[in-house]
Image (spheres, rainbow, N blue to C red):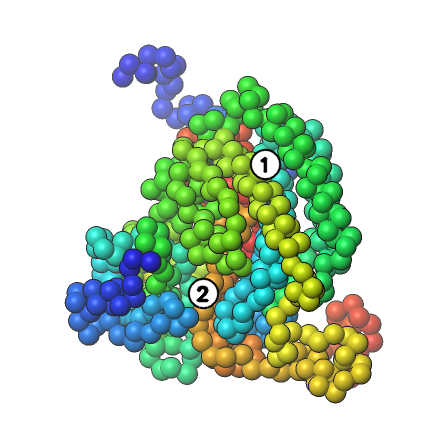
Amino acid sequence: MQEQQHHIILPEGSIEKQTNTLNLGPTHPATHGVMQNILELDGERIVSAEQTIGYIHRAFEKIAERRPLYQITTLTDRLNYCSSPINNMGWHLTCEKLLKVKTPKRVDYLRVIIMELARISDHLICNSIVAVDAGAFTGFVYVMQYRELIYEIYEEICGSRLTTNIGRIGGFERNFTATAFTKLEKFLREYPKVLKEFEGLCLRNRIFMDRLLHTGGISAERAMNYGFTGPNLRATGVDYDVRVHSPYSSYEDFDFIVPVGQTGDNYDRFLVRGEEMWQSLSIIEQAYRKVQEFKGAEAEVFHADIPEYYLPEKEDVYTKMEALIWHFKIIMGETEIPKGEVYNSVEGANGELGFYLVSDGGRTPYRLHFRRPCFIYYQAYSELTKGAMLSDAVITMSSLNLIAGELDA
Amino acid sequence: MALSNEEIKNKLIEKFGDIVTNFDEPYGMLSFEAPKDMNLKVLQFLYDDAALQFQFLTDLCAVHYPDDKGRELAVVYHLHNLVENTRIRFKVFTSTEKPDVFTATKLFSSANWMERESFDFFGVNFVGHPNLKRILNVDEMNYFPMRKEFPMEDQTRVDKDDEMFGRGGSII
């Protein structure tokens, strides 16, 4: 009652009392991807939001049912394309779990380097886009130069940049070159300074804080009920991290902190991602040190010895009968995969990326389901933005780190 | 891991008797099934029981087994106890003639879209779902594309007119 005195009382049915409908997306500069939000607005305040997704649905799960394991890696590239290497590795790890392949330690460490680089590049995009939506374009353009350093490392290892198709079942397609390590060193040397500058630009900036604090928040209970994972869950204060809870690729050998927030709002998500980048840097340094410790023949290992699934050297294919046979069997997908059901997950850049693979003993999966983290947590968006301002909804969307490719599979 | 698969299994059998069946541990994850009208009771028990506390729904998806008459569609729940760090897999089977399964949205908000996805691609009808409509496919679609009766195109077929695909010249 007290509150009403501050408002003008409008007659029933007057035009100011009606709400407006606004289509945010599917192609809107603020959505950063093809997704639509139908917002019901009362002035600038959001009454309700409904999401429409599926604009770039490409039937990956269906296609995967006709493809040998080998060819599914390229599908995983196109899920979260800001950090394809993590998806690739997650898929290889799933296959390795099904095939009961044990990878050498050096492979594990090299994979950790690649995955953490991918995490940094993903978080970097997300955080700088949050800054763009808050009005700070400079940071975004500046840090993109340093994401380029990461992409150059990918290029050196696998030849491509965005949809990487990096690695093979059992290891990598080729050993890391000396140039790759030089580029890695360059990145490790130059990046921390830039990240510090970027944080200096945003973290204690009054405008930035005002825009992010207390917007798009969610409690830990609701976040868990909504199936949040990754930085979005950790921002609410739950320290769930797949790398720690069920370590894969020898993550148990590394020392790192799992940063958590408190309120789960946009600012906490920003902070958690920022700190995770520092932690990733430290993991990469540790992994690089471990890689350098290998001596002699061990220092050349870059794949497990599994001729049924790992493509033989091209030179051998041309000169040796056995290698030629395996080459064709693998390329044509003529190897039967064992019967079984396996769920494997990795800590993707935006949450738990899971692969549920059902095999009936044929040459292709009987059923493959991707647990795409942002598909699951995006449904909380209407709850996150209820009663918020339109401009906050835009920041909330980018700070959730929604990737349309992953959303729509 | 404090909570062993054996303990979970014993608890379930103690509570539900021989209703829960097909216990298995593929690749270390406890997996079992229950009749489809019992799915909510089992999920609720797993959620509430002080020792079990499977309160995180990691994943929900469907699988189509057309040869298994009367139980063609499986709905697979992956549950996670975050405190003990234990995962389990729980399945219910339903026929395609009457693909009704109770919705888990009351228990897990995350089930909402995942159930819509299973409906969209497999036609599992989640009874009691607040908004059961297609999510990734167009609303006008009148079939369930992930079912096995819609096979992917045979890659060796030769009747395809390549001109339609911008590759010039037909091959037949």
* Residue bearing mark 2: A343
Residue A2: percent from the left, percent from the top? 28, 14
Frontmost residue, B79 versus B138: B79
Type of amino acid under label 1? Asn
Residue at horizontal 38 percent and vertical 82 percent from the top: B68
Q: Residues within 10 Å of mark 1 (few under 14, many from 20)?
A: many
- Are labels 1 and 2 assigned to the same chain? yes
Residue at horizontal 64 percent and vertical 50 percent from the top: A288
Q: Earlier in the sequence, mark 1 or mark 2?
A: 1
Residue A154: percent from the left, percent from the top? 71, 53
Question: Mark on residue A127?
Answer: 1
Q: Chain of mark 2?
A: A
Residue at horizontal 38 percent and vertical 18 percent from the top: A10
Secondary structure found at label 1: helix
Residue at mark 1 to residue at mark 2: CA–CA distance: 30 Å
Type of amino acid under label 2? Tyr
Please tell me whether residue A293 is drawn above or below residue A135 in the rendered image: below
Residue A235: percent from the left, percent from the top? 45, 38
Q: Can residue A38 be seen in the rendering of this structure?
A: no
